[in-house]
Every structure is written in structure tokens, then in C-alpha cells.
Image (cartoon, rainbow, N blue to C red):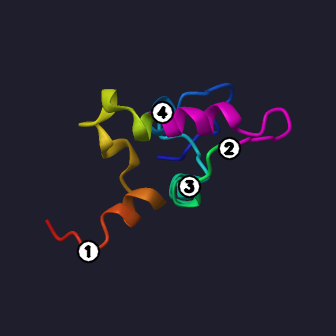
Amino acid sequence: MKKSVAIEIQDFEALIEKDCFYIDKTDFIREWWEANDSVTLITRPRRFGKTLNMSMLKRFFSIKYAQKGDVFQGLSIWNEENKGNTC
């Protein structure tokens, strides 16, 4: 099945579950975490994915979704977190 281009979907989970075209930006999570900055300012032009990135971060770090990590399966952060895990 072909992937569709999502218009106006700003929720990370909905975008992944609907199998929409997505450029994997999950490596941003690791880079941001390892930077250990006390403040992070994300400035980008309109329609550049700021809300979608915040939704992705919320999904990754919120304990509300602790048992639902499968939404990241196959993405960069999933591969990074599961390196060396053979179970």
C-alpha cells in the first residue's frame, strides 16, 4: 500500500498509525537529550513541524505512554535504543 502525504496531522501517533509519509526526525530526541542544555529554543518557520516534533517528544517521554513504545518501532530512535538487545 502506498503511503499518503498527511495534511494538517499534528499528532505523532496518528501520523504513524495512519501509515502516512514521515521523514524520520526521531534522532532529534537522542541529540537533544545528550546536549544536556538547561533551555532549548526551537525556532523554525511556519509549517516546519514544530508541533509534530513536540508531539513526538511528548509521546517518547510521557509515562502515560510508557507501555506503548511500539509506535517508534523501525524509526531511528528505536534502532538506537535496541542496539545490543537481543531479547
Residue drawn at 54 percent across, 32 percent down? 55
Q: Which residue is mark 3?
A: 36
**Picture coordinates of residue 13, whole percent (x, y):** 45, 33
Tell me if 11 is positioned left or right of 77 in this view.
right
Question: Is 52 in the magenta?
Answer: yes
Q: On the image, numbered disc 4 is attached to which residue?
A: 58
Where in the figure is residue 71, as x and y percent of width and height? 37, 42
Q: Which residue is mark 1?
A: 84
Determine contact: label 2, label 3, CB under 8 Å: no
**Location of residue 11 by image quarter:** top right
Q: Which residues are magenta?
A: 40-58
Q: Is residue 48 above or below residue 76?
A: above
Amino acid found under the numbered disc labelled 3: Asn
Closer to viewer: mark 4 or mark 3: 3
Badges 1 and 2: C-beta atoms under 8 Å apart? no
Q: Nearer the viewer, mark 1 or mark 2?
A: 2
Secondary structure found at label 2: loop
Residue at the (70%, 38%) spot, across then down? 49
Name which of mark 2 and mark 4 comes first in the sequence. 2
